[in-house]
Amino acid sequence: MPDVKKLMYVNRRAPYGTIYAWESLEVVLVGAAFDQDVSLAFLDDGVYQLTRGQSTEGIGMKNFSAIYSALGDYEVTRIYVEKESLEERGLTLDDLQHLTWEDEDEDWAEKESIRLVDRAELADVMSNQDVMFNF
Amino acid sequence: MSILHIVNKSPYEKNSLDTAVGFVKNGDTVLLIEDAVYAAAKGGSVAAKLDGLDVSVLGSDLAARGIAEDRLIDGVSVVDYSGFVDLVEAKDSTQSWL
């Protein structure tokens, strides 16, 4: 495919307190229509975006957490979560949603979308991107 | 003179909680709302900053962020919006550490 760029969306803010998380998700979904090589990174407070059990009735805001589980259908199959950020917040992968995608090259086998990486590994992934969008 | 110290920023991103805690005196209460509720989650590296303080958190903001009440550090009170009003009323003044 010509002109496929490697795009990474870098998410560093908690959901709801500011609009960054929701704006990022909207841009990811729009961008997914353009057949680019898209990945997402969650670090610092961004890891809170992926937590399970969010329920926003009491604060009168849209609960957009369920949309992360649809990213696989938009061919967003690589979601990097930084280990140090989870640990600092007392979280583990079990506190996050289970996100998967289906691999059409392997008879739609269900695969894990989340990749737990440490800071050095994430830095390596970042250094291979063409463009990074920061939220 | 008692003060209700209201904090709404994530303690992992801003220093609002640090500053607020530094101003707390006997009889004061710290109320965590919005992204500040993460401070009260057990196992987090900032939780110790609340040791020995009278701390309340807004339940709606906890629920929005998927933090179950059994994941809170010991001694924290969960309040609803009317409990928020009660706290404001009970203290002599209110300080919002924006």
Image (spheres, rainbow, N blue to C red):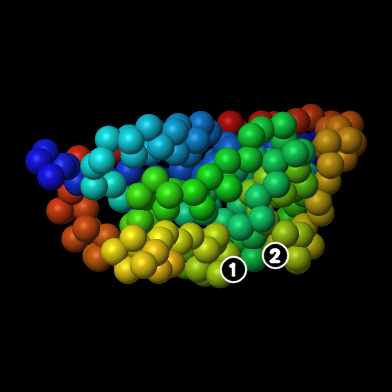
Secondary structure under the numbered disc 2 in the rendered image: helix
Within-10-Å neighbours for mark 2: few <14, some 14–19, many 20+: few
Disc 2 marks a residue whose amino acid type is: Arg
Residue drawn where x is 19% and y is 46% of the image: A6
Does dot 1 land on a helix, a strand or a loop?
loop
Packing grade of label 1 (10 A; few <14, some 14-19, many >=20) is some
Marks 1 and 2: in contact by CB < 8 Å? yes
> Quick check: can you spot residue A55?
yes
> Which residue is drawn at the image coordinates 70% and 47% (left, top)?
A55
Between B84 and B30, the one lying in front of the other is B84
Which percent across, then down, holds residue A89? Answer: 52, 61
Q: Is B96 on the left-hand or right-hand side of A88? A: right
| Left or right: B57 in relation to B17 | right
Quadrant showing the C terminus of chain B = top right
Q: Which mark is residue B71?
A: 2
Tell me the quarter of the picture where residue A57 sits: top right
Indicate left or right for A79 with B56 as reference.
Answer: left
Distance between mark 2 and mark 1 Cα atoms: 9 Å
Q: Which percent across, then down, holds residue B12?
A: 49, 51
The residue that mark 1 highlights is B43
